[in-house]
Structure formats: C-alpha cells, structure tokens
Amino acid sequence: MASPLPPLSVGVRARVPAKINLALKVGPRRRDGYHPLATVYHAVSLYDEVSAGWAEPDEFEVSVSGEGADLVPLDEDNLVVRAARLLARTHGPYDSLGASLSIRKAIPVAAGLAGGSADGAAALVACAALWDLDLSAEALRTLAAELGSDVPFALLGGTAVGSGRGEEVVPALARGTYHWVLGFGHHGLSTPAVYGRFDQLTPHPAAPEVPDELMTALRTGDPRQLGAALVNDLQPAALDLQPRLRQVIEAGLDFGAVGALISGSGPTAAFLAASEPAAIDLAVALSADGLCREVRRASGPVTGARLVG
Ligand code: ATP
C-alpha cells in the first residue's frame, strides 16, 4: 500500500498532567506479581508535553528535554514509542505509519507522579490526531490499559477512583479546587522496590478499599477534611527506603499544610494547603528550608491528556 501523504502541518502537540494519589490502598500480591489497588487519583497542574510529527513508515524516534530528561530511555522502552507503535499496529495501516516524537518534561522521573504513563497517554492522543484515526474514547481507553496501570487515568484526568491494578477508572464525585505544594526528592524511587518493601513490611494486607471519609471529604470540598483523610499504604515502605522523607513530611505540616502524604510509590511529597495564599506561603517556607530538591505549586483537579495549540 502506498504511504499516505504527510499533512502540511508540522505536527500535533498534547499536554498531560501528573497525578497524585489521594488514597492508595494496596492488597496482597497476586500470583501474576501485581497488587490489587483501591486508589483515588487526582490530576494536578504540572504538565508534560508530547509532540508528534510525520516520519517514514515504521520509523519511531523520540527525543526528550526538560526535567530529568537524561533519565528517560530513548529506545523502544520509552512509553511514547510503545504507545505510538501500539496505536499504529491496532488501528492504522501499520506499514505506512511512523512518528517523530518529542517529549518536554516538567514531571520528574521515577517520582510517584506517573510521568511515564502520562507521556504514553499524550502520545496516544497526539498520534491519533497526527494520523487522523477515528477512534472512540473507549478504544483509546483499552489501548491505555494495555500500556500500563496509570495510563487510563492520565487520559481521563480529574479525580477518579481506580481499581484492579489501577487501570479501571471511574470519575469521582468531587467539589472544588485544591491547592497543592509538591516537594521533589533528590533521588527517584523504583516502583518495584517500593512494592517489594511493602510486601516485607505488610505480610497480610487486607483487601483494598477506598476509605469512606475520603469520598465524603471530596464531596464537601473542604481541604481540611480532605487533608485529614489522605492515606497511602506505600508510604511506610517509601519512608523506610528514604528515611529523609519523614523530615520532609514533618516540615510541611509544621509550615501549615492541612494534609501531607507521599504520592504513589514516592518520593514526591504532596502537601495540601487550606487556600491558594496558604499554598504560596507553604511553598516559600519549604523552599527556604532546603530539604527538597525543588518545590512546586499545583492545583487540581485538571483534565487529562488533551491536544493543544
Ligand atoms: P509509576 O508510574 O510506576 O508510579 P513513576 O511515576 O514513579 O512510576 P515514571 O516517571 O513514570 O515514574 O518513570 C518510571 C520509569 O519509566 C523511568 O525510570 C523510566 O525508565 C521509564 N520511562 C519510560 N518512558 C518514560 C517517559 N516517557 N518518561 C519517564 N520515564 C519513562
């Protein structure tokens, strides 16, 4: 089959947010190695961008710039390459599609913010537009779940309850905007290492369930109520692997956060502020304290992977 002619435009760009987990309840390790999860995802305004341009058939290349770029693989392991190939194989005239992909990262790597998964979701959205594929939301969601547990949420955004391995997502009833301060760690944490430590520290975890208090707090929109309900079963394992994180959490609470937790498998610490001005004060105090590599403010919820420009 002849290759479709490249469009006149140079390409398309998608923007995708980081996630934090407001609740992360982890069950016993399954035979397939995965842990069943009950989680509440929350998308925050810290964005990566993925651009996709036309390339020769079967050519998939990627470049990365920005936060932690040197830690991101440039080969077939990169989630944007895997996403583009999966989309071409399942929905396109595979032999005639290729993509030149570039990622601009603001989401730190191996930080518990699902940056790689976010990039995968953005690549699905960008390549579907680049190749002019007529895909339903459901078809995109199925591909996302195949790519990784956090990818379907990165497509959806907002605040959502995740189950299974985290790939089954349902929007949550939530009111209001929350103001967060994120403290980035000096070193990443490997997700498998954190789960391994969780298994050692928690020999008999209960079947995971999202706490009712958290869902109630989300419906009220009251940050103090939400702050008191934040929970992460992986936090003891992350603190055990990086004991300095304990000081980070304590510092944020001392500086007035109404809630604090490690996001996902860490090491990012997420602090909830009572208001936007309180978040500004908290970010200034934490930055001056110097415990974190970098401190950023973000608000949530925000929408998932979308085309921009
Ligand atoms: P998880 O999604 O497992 O919680 P995380 O949020 O802690 O992980 P990521 O930033 O997603 O961490 O990176 C995890 C690993 O994924 C990295 O160490 C890197 O080797 C790999 N990776 C593959 N593609 C990407 C990408 N586009 N951006 C970042 N990391 C990527």
Image (cartoon, rainbow, N blue to C red):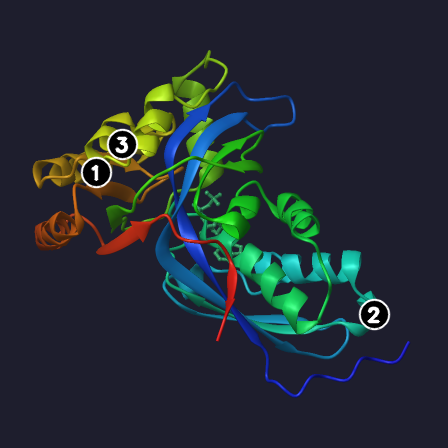
Tell me where residue 58 appears, x and y as whole percent. Answer: 76, 71
Tell me where residue 7 appears, x and y as whole percent. Answer: 69, 84
Q: Nearer the viewer, residue 168 or 86?
A: 168
* Mark 3 or mark 1, earlier in chain: 3
Tell me where residue 288 appears, x and y as whole percent. Answer: 8, 54
Circle 3/circle 2 CB separation < 8 Å: no
Residue hosting label 2: 95
Residue hosting label 1: 244
Amino acid type shown at disc 1: Arg
Amino acid type shown at disc 2: Asp
Q: Is residue 110 visible?
A: no
At numbered mark 1, what does the secondary structure look like: helix, strand or loop? helix
Hey, which residue is sitting farthest right in the picture? 1
- Above or below, 180 against 170 in this view is below
Q: Residue at x 50, y 20 (%)?
A: 27
Q: Nearer the viewer, residue 237 or 49?
A: 49
Q: Is residue 95 shown left or right of residue 107?
A: right
Q: Is residue 141 shown left or right of residue 193?
A: right
Local packing at callout 3 (Cα closer than 10 Å; few below 14, some 14-19, many 20+) is: many
Q: Residue at x 55, y 22 (%)?
A: 29
